[in-house]
Amino acid sequence: MRIFILEDDERRIKIFTNKLKDHTLELATSVDQAKSILLKNKETPFDVLFLDHDLDGMVFVNSEWDNTGYQLVKYIVENKILYGYAVIHSQNPDGAKAMHDLLPHSLEIPFIVLELFLFKDDVNNKLAAFNILSKMNK
């Protein structure tokens, strides 16, 4: 699978890269970097987007700030960037909701839930957790 990740936290980046090492990963730590990667890959859409809201080491920031996942989601919508699934993994509930409002088919799954359930090594646990979480987001 081709997976795109917007994340600035080093610990989370290590978890993503370790747990998804069998996939093709593209990582951005800023909105400008993310826009460049998505534009470069516009003809070959990513299967999954993992999107954080709060960047620059900040927490609970306003979605209107320039370097937030919300600004990237606006770019994705405005430029009709295609993708398979989007997972909003922000711990910021207001930011995650704002992103989800623009991408209504995305899943809102805080990173702690991804870490506890989806990134476990047992495949059956992963599938069961994903099914439960996808039903929660409907």
Image (spheres, grey):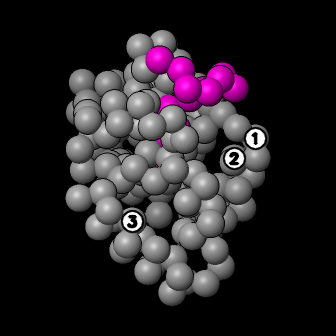
Q: Earlier in the sequence, mark 3 or mark 2?
A: 2
Residue located beneath label 1 in the image: 10
- Residue 33 vs residue 21: left or right? left
Residue located beneath label 2 in the image: 13
Q: Position of residue 3 (x, y in %)?
A: 49, 53
Q: Are marks 2 and 1 in contact (CB under 8 Å)?
A: yes
Q: Position of residue 109 (x, y in %)?
A: 46, 53
Q: Residues within 10 Å of mark 1 (few under 14, many from 20)?
A: few
The C terminus: image quadrant: bottom left
Which of discs 3 and 2 lies nearer the camera? The answer is 3
Q: What predominant SS class does the magenta segment belong to?
A: loop
Extent of the magenta region:
49-62
Query: Is residue 122 highlighted in magenta?
Result: no
Which of discs 1 and 3 lies nearer the camera? The answer is 3
Q: Which mark is residue 133?
A: 3
Depth check, front residue: 59 or 73: 59
Find numbered disc 1 in the image and state the secondary structure of the residue it sits on: helix
Q: Residues within 10 Å of mark 3 (few under 14, many from 20)?
A: some
Q: Residue at x 26, y 33 (%)?
A: 102
- Residue 4 vs residue 19: left or right? left
Amino acid of disc 3: Leu
